[in-house]
Image: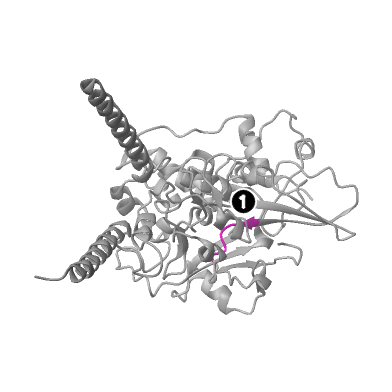
């Protein structure tokens, strides 16, 4: 009888041990950092190509020590020049392998009729361009324009304020970035962003956002969307460089507006030719 | 020999020190190294983002190996258009200076679709200062060509007015009206 009792106890002990081991091992899978899915190091431009074949588009960065505390950048979108071709959307999707149905940047079409009624649409984020005019508007069309949207890089970012784990932050050089290793995917930042720029990636299950192509900027390259824009509607540059187009625009007398100014987010993304109705 | 009460107090003190020591160790283990360098976040994440792979090159990086296309492209009205928009990204094509795969070349009706992405008059938002637009098939009718024609049958896609200007030069015809 005694032996039987003993073996029974051992079995229970073994059972509890195994369950605990299993539980710990299982939870470790969640704790260990995942491979960054979707970003294949083989897919990018190699370092030798970067050095050889890429010109310097933002002066003073390539081959220089990057002083993170002294850099200042601005993004200007000229609505009057945007033709809604969607090159920027395509480039953005390709640069980051953005999962289908999510957009780091997109182009909206605004239509205004004579009763000041506003119609906004954005089929597939502008990825396929705008091939057809809207045919569901009965009244006469007064004004039509395209509005490219991307991260506003607020100086008072609401998304950073609400993040419970410090996974999103503002760098000393003014970029609002994501730390996908720390992100727990609570999506609080997605609710907080007044510009709806963030999304929860179905691949990494973490929040993602437009970074103004921080990885390109640090190599002295323009963001991919600026790079491919055929009309110069998107402009990016360093405010330390007095010859840059954005510096001249910001210094000049032209009217510049930001989106949702009343929210006090102080965006570093400025619009030229922005209509009052655009939100 | 210490009294029983003194032993109790010492035990309590030792256990408090031990527990807080373990707690601090665990905390130090859990907080990432660079956390708090610039603010309440992991400063290394900035460098990690900066290390992300670049997939788009520039037009200049394409022209390095394609001098003929460069010559045409840079002379034409399409010089501001990115090679990679129509042909695909640089990193899908070149790796360490070697070609790794062909990039697609658009053909036939695909070209017309691509042209009309920008040059469609029906989309009213396009500023005439920025771009010339045409209405289809009105443009084909006006130019007296078949309605089945694709844009690239008259226009060089890299320099849209190249053939047209050359033809005018040869025939001595001036712009009508």
Please identify the quarter of the rendering in which residue B5 is found: bottom left
The image shows residue B32 at horizontal and vertical percentages of: 32, 59
Please identify the quarter of the rendering in which residue A188 is found: bottom right
Is A229 within the magenta?
no
Does residue A162 appear left or right of residue B8 in this picture? Answer: right
Q: Nearer the viewer, residue A49 or A15?
A: A15
Q: Nearer the viewer, residue B113 or A279?
A: A279
The image shows residue B127 at horizontal and vertical percentages of: 72, 57
Q: Over which residues does the magenta segment extend?
A: A148-153
Is residue B156 visible in the rendered image? The answer is: yes
Q: Which residue position is annotated with label 1?
A: A106
Does residue B71 appear left or right of residue A251 in this picture? Answer: left
The image shows residue B109 at horizontal and vertical percentages of: 64, 30
The image shows residue B170 at horizontal and vertical percentages of: 62, 42
Q: What's the image's color scheme?
A: one colour
Q: Secondary structure at mark 1?
A: strand
Which chain does the residue under circle 1 lie in?
A
Name the residue: 41% across, 38% down. B92
Name the residue: 55% across, 33% down. B106
Is A149 within the magenta?
yes
Main secondary-structure element of the magenta-colored stretch: loop
Classed neighbour count for the residue bearing mark 1: other residues with Cα under 10 Å, few (<14), some (14–19), many (≥20)? many
Q: Nearer the viewer, residue A71 or A28?
A: A28
| Location of residue B123 with respect to A2 vertically, above or below | below
């Amino acid at each position: 009888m005694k032996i039987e009792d003993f073996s029974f106890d051992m079995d229970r002990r073994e059972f509890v041990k195994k369950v605990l081991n299993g539980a710990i091992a299982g939870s470790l899978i969640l704790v260990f950092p995942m491979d960054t899915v979707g970003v294949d190091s083989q897919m990018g431009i190699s370092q030798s190509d970067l050095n050889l074949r890429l010109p310097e588009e933002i002066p003073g960065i390539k081959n220089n020590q990057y002083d993170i505390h002294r850099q200042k950048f601005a993004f200007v979108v000229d609505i009057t020049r945007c033709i809604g071709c969607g090159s920027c959307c395509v480039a953005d999707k390709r640069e980051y392998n953005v999962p289908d149905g999510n957009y780091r940047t997109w182009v909206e079409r605004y239509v205004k009729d004579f009763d000041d009624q506003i119609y906004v649409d954005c089929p597939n984020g502008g990825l396929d361009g705008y091939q057809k005019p809207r045919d569901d508007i009965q009244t006469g069309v007064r004004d039509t324009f395209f509005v490219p949207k991307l991260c506003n890089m607020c100086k008072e970012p609401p998304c950073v304020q609400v993040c419970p784990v410090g996974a999103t932050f503002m760098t000393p050089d003014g970029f609002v970035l994501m730390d996908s290793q720390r992100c727990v995917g609570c999506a609080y930042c997605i609710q907080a962003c007044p510009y709806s720029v963030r999304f929860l990636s179905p691949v990494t299950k973490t929040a993602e956002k437009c970074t103004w192509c921080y990885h390109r900027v640090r190599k002295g390259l323009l963001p991919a969307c600026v790079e491919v824009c055929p009309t110069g509607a998107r402009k990016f540059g360093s405010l330390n460089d007095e010859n840059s187009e954005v510096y001249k625009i910001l210094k000049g007398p032209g009217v510049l507006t930001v989106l949702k100014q009343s929210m006090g987010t102080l965006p570093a993304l400025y619009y030229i030719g922005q209509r009052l109705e655009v939100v | 020999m210490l009294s029983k009460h003194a032993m109790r107090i010492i035990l309590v003190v030792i256990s408090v020190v031990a527990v807080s020591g373990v707690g601090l160790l665990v905390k130090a283990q859990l907080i990432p190294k660079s956390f708090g360098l610039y603010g309440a976040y992991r400063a290394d994440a900035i460098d990690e983002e900066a290390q992300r792979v670049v997939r788009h090159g520039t037009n200049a990086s394409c022209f390095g190996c394609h001098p003929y296309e460069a010559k045409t492209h840079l002379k034409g009205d399409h010089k501001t258009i990115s090679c990679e928009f129509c042909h695909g990204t640089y990193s899908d094509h070149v790796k360490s200076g070697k070609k790794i795969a062909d990039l697609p070349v658009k053909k036939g009706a695909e070209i017309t679709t691509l042209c009309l992405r920008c040059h469609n008059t029906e989309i009213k938002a396009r500023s005439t200062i920025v771009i010339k637009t045409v209405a289809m098939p009105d443009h084909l009718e006006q130019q007296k060509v078949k309605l089945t024609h694709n844009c690239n049958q008259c226009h060089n896609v890299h320099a849209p007015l190249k053939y047209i200007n050359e033809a005018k030069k040869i025939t001595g015809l001036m712009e009508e009206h």
